[in-house]
Amino acid sequence: VQLQAYGGGLVQAGGSLRLSCAASGRRFGSYGVGWFRQTPGKDREFVAAISGSGSTTYYADSVKGRFTISRDNAKNTVHLQMNSLKPEDTAVYYCAARGSVTTTAQAMNTRRYDYWGQGTQVTVSS
């Protein structure tokens, strides 16, 4: 599976952005997909994840109620709608794909993910 993240940009605090992760390869619906973010000097941080069918979603506490993850398996795409953005959301955002998981902790674990896309920069100005 090859992944490509796009949709980042510069936005003012309180604004919105929609990130997308386009996947190539077969059986995309069998892969869970997660979004992570990273700032310089810090570890990659879990943001949100979705199961292969789209029936289960996971969110970091810091983005609950503001971000929504969704997927369209017919188009091999996963989206991350980000609303009410804050300056602390500024980071490079990555999408990644993995096999199935059964717990939130597993979905949040970067080591569970086998495929990674390149990052897309999100900058939120105050």
Image (cartoon, grey):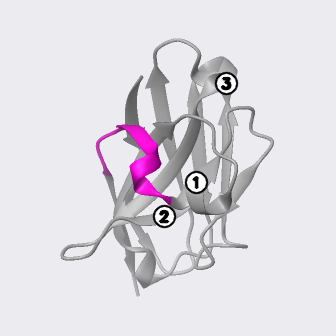
Q: Residue furthest right?
A: 55
Q: Label 3: state its secondary structure.
A: helix
Q: Which residue is mark 3?
A: 73
Q: Label 2: state its secondary structure.
A: strand
Q: Is residue 7 visible?
A: no
Q: Residue at x 58, y 22 (%)?
A: 28
Gap between marks 1 and 3 measured at Cα? 19 Å
Residue 86: x %, y % from top left: 50, 81
Lower sequence index among marks 1 and 2:
2
Q: Is residue 113 magenta?
A: yes
Residue 121: x %, y % from top left: 31, 58
Lower sequence index among marks 2 and 3:
2
Q: Amino acid at mark 3?
A: Asn
Q: Residue furthest bottom?
A: 126
Q: Amino acid at mark 2?
A: Phe
Q: Residue at x 73, y 73 (%)?
A: 65
Between 27 and 92, the residue placed more toward the observer is 27
| Position of residue 13 in the picture relative to residue 54 (left or right) | left
Q: Which residue is mark 2?
A: 46
Q: Is residue 75 above or below residue 17?
A: above
Q: Residue at x 81, y 42 (%)?
A: 55
Q: Label 1: state its secondary structure.
A: helix
Gap between marks 1 and 2 measured at Cα? 9 Å
Residue 58: x %, y % from top left: 67, 59
**Front label number (1 vs 2):** 1
Q: Which mark is residue 107?
A: 1
Q: Which mark is residue 70?
A: none
Between 14 and 40, the residue placed more toward the observer is 40
Q: Residues within 10 Å of mark 2 (few under 14, many from 20)?
A: many
- Quarter of the image for residue 84 reads bottom right
**What segment carries the magenta color?**
109-119
Residue 50: x %, y % from top left: 66, 46
